[in-house]
Image: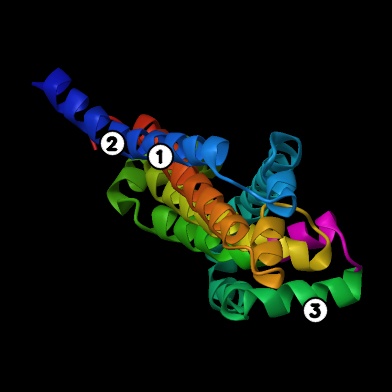
Amino acid sequence: MESSAGWRSWRGLLIQPALIAVVLAGYFVWLATADLTETEARPLSWDSLGPAIAEHLRLTFLAAAIVVVLAVPLGILLTRRPLRRLSGPVIAVANVGQAAPAIGLFVLLAMWLGFGPWTAVVALVAYAVLPVLRNTMVGLSGVDAKLVEAGRGMGMSALAVLLRVELPLAVPVILAGVRTALVLLVGTATLAVFIDGGGLGILITTGINLYLPDLLVSGALLVALLALLIDWLGRVVEHVAHPRGL
């Protein structure tokens, strides 16, 4: 019964990548057979498209790594009794980055820090820190207090209880926050082009500025497929990391 249930859960996870593969294959078939002008063909050639995708992913994963390194330890600290009273103000500050219009955040930071990929990373971190911070706090706060007391009753230190009881139980919620942040980052990274940060946004902006629908649709479709792929990878990691028996 357990193996049958496990297969059904994995089978559900296989639908999304199959759809992504079908759409991507259809797009490349169209790209190989479409009658494109030189202005359209140049940015859609693999020599241009490959580096743009690599830049987009680099911005996304670098910002995500910084978000995790900052937000998870901060979320842990804010659930500890001495710092719990600061959780409200810190969440309010983190919420500013996501509440502000993304393009405004990019431009303001560029005026302060200068144009380039690193400024784009800073803007992306400010925009995506809230889901990970909030989910870390929610996940740890949702751990059954009886389990924490049981750990302490066994003689564990506060650090041991955190590492061996609280964090393993909070991992699914924390990973859900990381997955949400990654999907946000993939879409928002298209704005990096406005501050010379690179990425797939160049296809979208060029398509709009020169009224080239093929470029516009290509950029939007590739970003959407990347977001769906990263969302699926996040779901797989959540599935694998979920504590068994919960």
Spatial CA distance of label 1 from label 2 is 9 Å
Tell me residue 131's x, y (percent): 51, 61
> In terms of sequence position, does the residue under pointer 1 or pointer 2 come before the other?
2
Q: Nearer the viewer, mark 1 or mark 2?
A: 1
The residue that mark 1 highlights is: 20
Q: Within the image, what quadrant is residue 117 found in?
A: bottom right
Q: Is residue 11 left or right of residue 68?
A: left
- The residue lying toward the viewer, choosing from 105 and 177, is 105
- Marks 1 and 3, Cα distance to the nearest angstrom? 35 Å
For the residue marked with disc 1, what is the amino acid?
Ile
Give the Cα distance between marks 2 and 3.
41 Å
Q: Secondary structure at mark 3?
A: helix
Residue drawn at the location 67% of the way across and 59% of the way down: 201
Q: Judging from the image, what secondary structure is the residue with disc 2 in?
A: helix
Task: Name which residue type carries label 3.
Answer: Leu
Q: Tell me which label, 2 or 3, sits earlier in the chain.
A: 2
Q: Residue at x 37, y 35 (%)?
A: 22
Tell me, yes or no, if residue 160 can be seen here. Answer: no
Q: Nearer the viewer, residue 14 or 99?
A: 14
Q: Residue at x 77, y 68 (%)?
A: 194
* Residue 108, disc: 3
Image position of 147 (left or right of 37): left
Q: Position of residue 174 (x, y in %)?
A: 46, 49
Q: Which residue is mark 2?
A: 15
The one nearer the camera, 36 or 215, is 36
Callout 1–callout 2 Cβ contact below 8 Å = no
170 relative position to 157: left or right: left
Q: Are marks 2 and 3 in contact (CB under 8 Å)?
A: no
Residue lying farthest to the left in this orientation? 1
In front of the other: 151 or 203: 203
* Residue range (magenta): 114-125
User: Which type of secondary structure does the marked residue at label 1 adopt?
Assistant: helix
